Image (tube, rainbow, N blue to C red):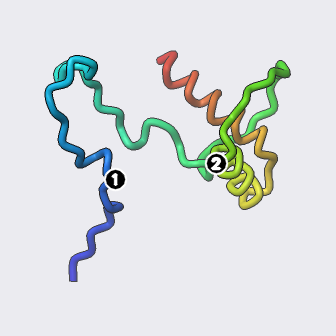
Amino acid sequence: MSQNLDPPRQTWETAEYSDNPELPEAEDLQIIDKGFLPRPEELVFKDTETENITVPLDKETVAFFKDKAKELGASYQTLVRSILREYVARQSR
C-alpha cells in the first residue's frame, strides 16, 4: 500500500487568482523551497554576543516558540535568535 507523505495543501497554495493590478506578475514571483528555514528541532543553539532589543510579536508566534522551546528544553528567546541567525546565514550566501 502506497502512502502519501506530503501534508495536505493549504488554501493559499490552491487559490485561484484573477487579474488584479495590485498583484505581481506570475513571472516576477519567486518559489521558496520548503526547506528554506530549518524546523525548530534542527536549530543549533550557539552562544553568541547579543544585543537587547524590543520586538513586538503576535501572540500566536510567541506561543509557538514557547511550546517548541519547552519541548526542546531551551528558552524561546534562544530559539528565536537561532532561527533569525539561520535566516541571515542563508541570505548571506
Q: Is residue 19 left or right of residue 61?
A: left
In this picture, is 26 found above or below 70?
A: above
Q: CA distance from mark 1 to mark 2?
A: 18 Å
Where residue 7 sits in the image (x, y, percent)?
A: 35, 61
What amino acid is found at the position of numbered circle 1 in the picture?
Gln
First in residue order: circle 1 vs circle 2: 1
Please name the residue shown 74% across and 26% down the image.
55
Please name the residue shown 38% across and 43% down the image.
34
In this picture, is 91 found above or below 32?
A: above
Where residue 32 sits in the image (x, y, percent)?
A: 35, 33
Q: Is residue 76 left or right of residue 82?
A: right
Q: In this orientation, which residue lies closer to the viewer: 49 or 29?
A: 29
Please name the residue shown 72% across and 30% down the image.
56
**Circle 2 sits on which residue?**
60
Q: Which mark is residue 28?
A: none
Q: Quadrant of residue 24?
A: top left
Q: In this orientation, which residue lies closer to the viewer: 39 or 57?
A: 57
In this picture, is 41 found above or below 91?
A: below
Neighbourhood count class around disc 1 (C-alpha, 10 Å): few under 14, some 14–19, many 20 upward: few
In this picture, is 21 found above or below 6?
A: above
Neighbourhood count class around disc 2 (C-alpha, 10 Å): few under 14, some 14–19, many 20 upward: few
Q: Is residue 35 left or right of residue 87?
A: left
Q: Quadrant of residue 26?
A: top left
Total numbered labels placed on residues in the image: 2
What amino acid is found at the position of numbered circle 2 in the picture?
Glu
Find out whether the residues at labels 1 and 2 contact each other: C-beta distance under 8 Å.
Answer: no
Q: Is label 2 in a helix, a strand or a loop?
A: helix
Q: Which mark is residue 10?
A: 1
Where residue 73 sits in the image (x, y, percent)?
A: 79, 56
Please name the residue shown 64% across and 44% down the image.
61
Quadrant for the N terminus, please: bottom left
